[in-house]
Amino acid sequence: MRLEGHGGILIAEVMKRWGADHLFTLSGGHIFPIYDGCVKVGGIRIVDTRHEQTAAFAAEGYAKLTRRPGFAALTAGPGVTNGMSALTTAYFNGSPLVVFGGRAPQARWGQGSLQEFDHVPVVRPVTKVATTATSTGEISKVVDSCVSEATSPHRGPAFVDFPLDVLFVPGEAELDDGTPAGQQSPRSVSGDPAAVARLLQEAERPVLVAGSDVYWEGAWDSLRSLVEEASLPTFLNGMGRGCLPADHPLCFSRARSTALKQADLVMVAGTPLDFRLNFGRFGQARVVHLVDHPDLVARHVELAASAAGPLGEVFDGIRTSAKFGAREEWIASLRDDEKKKRAKDAEEMGSGARPVNAARIYGELKKRLERDAIVICDGGDFVSFAGRYVDVYEPGCWMDPGPYGCLGTGVGYALAAKLLYPQRQVVVVFGDGAFGFSGLDFDTLVRFDVPVVGVVGNNGIWGLEKHPMRALYGYDVAADLQPECRYDLVVEALGGHGEFVTDPEEIGPALERAFEAGKPALVNVATDPEQVYPRSSNLA
Ligand SMILES: Cc1ncc(C[n+]2csc(CCOP(=O)(O)OP(=O)(O)O)c2C)c(N)n1
Ligand SMILES: [Mg+2]
């Protein structure tokens, strides 16, 4: 197809070709033509935030929820550097985030133009591709290939910046016809699914851990068929949560430590063998790694077998390569453990303790969450409790920051979620510390009429730092926040609905008012600063 116009028109045309309907941004003169392109080409909503980190996290959140590219435009220099944490987060999460940067004019490079800074070497280590479009005529091809790279497995962010004197001037270009995804190179399965099937057939106590790439690959149906056919107890992490519904008879969560201790075979699919999985060491168990790209097969662990490629095909290949037994005893023992732990959880979630026990907040939330609610986590200890207490039933309903563990994803992710799904509940759980990173972007939620519900577990401290520091040093420093700070009033001042709660009995009614407020709401609950999340994972 033939394209004509200034650089921004050429960019918007390529975005449309990839199905884009949102661009997240914060204004800056260097990127005006991109806005003009979106306006003139039509069909792309420009969503402007109060901080580039929110814009870039929103674009990453958009990608996470749609499994399509998410787009952000950041102005030259500080606009781009404010997006660094989101780019890095997307790199760790394998999210197809595409960031467009403004850039000082190339004809004057070296003379000291405003915000003259070469972003490319800075973002290169955290992107799949980072480049500068050096002529107007090449813009379409450069953008198209960036999006293609970002969306081909293993997915990840792409960055391209546009010098002022390239972006503002007219140009023309020719792009291949056809669907862009159809132009990506075909994939095949490598490794040995049949060997995995044999190990699974021989195993008495196998366990499957399935993570985010199962979701990115859209492989949940094949996952479920394999799990059912092989009677395979399954645990989910990251965006894998919901790929098997939490109430499926083979889906477990609280029995995880027991299962990983007793298993004779641990199959890990679509997630790295990192600190969240004890670096792939599971006692005597044999370990299998299934990934979406051969480069991701773990090298730091002795694997009994592995397979790489389209995860749906990998699962189908394993399922059809052998016949599997029923493993009734193993499943029953795990179910027993799961039930015992859940009974204890239920007690905690009904706690009437004052100050409020964080578990009680989840107890009240759980009663009011619909099956397709999107739950977003941004914080320390308070959101670790969410991982324990919130059940996920459908793919794409759970958004944590992922292994980069960056505070401040909350409002950006929520903005994208509620713009995409205005009819669904979108809930962000924040630590009070975390809230400070993106809280002022409740203004953006108000301006775009995006009624998400935020819940702050307000312990008045950086809990996940204060308690470990005390344990290590016997004292702590730089770990206190204002006790009972009224973040709800901040949200009210920005035009939203606020609730402040200190009485556990008031949490439920406050949540209900927040869901019914019809505007962005924050339920700010004062919680017990002495409560520590019982943590076992190795961060080193
Ligand atoms: C951008 C960023 N800065 C600092 C940290 C280190 N960090 C991890 S958890 C945490 C404390 C979070 O406190 P809060 O959000 O109040 O949650 P709490 O643990 O108190 O429940 C900090 C500072 C981080 N992960 N990301
Ligand atoms: Mg806190």
Image: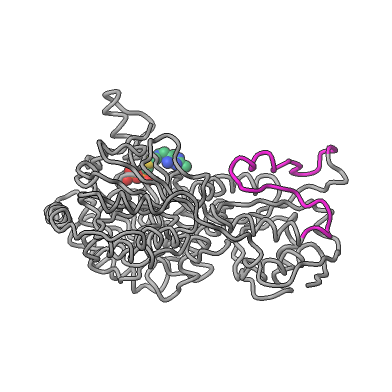
Left or right: 64 in relation to 194: right
Q: Is residue 229 magenta?
A: no
Q: Does the magenta stretch include residue 127?
A: yes
**Quadrant including the N terminus:** bottom right
Which color mode does the image show?
Answer: one colour
Give percent across and percent down for residue 270.
42, 52
Give percent across and percent down for residue 229.
28, 64
Give percent across and percent down for residue 6.
82, 65
Give percent across and percent down for residue 139.
78, 59
Q: Which of 162 and 116 is in front in this view?
A: 162
Residue drawn at x 45%, y 61% is 313
Q: Quadrant of residue 488?
A: bottom left
Q: Is residue 237 above or below residue 242?
A: above
Quarter, ligand 1? top left
Q: Is residue 272 above or below residue 338?
A: above
Residue drawn at x 25%, y 42% is 533
Disc count in the image?
0
Outermost right residue: 107
Q: Tell me where the magenta segment starts and ends, as one range.
A: 110-139
Q: Which of 223 and 27 is in front in this view?
A: 223
Left or right: 274 in relation to 206: right
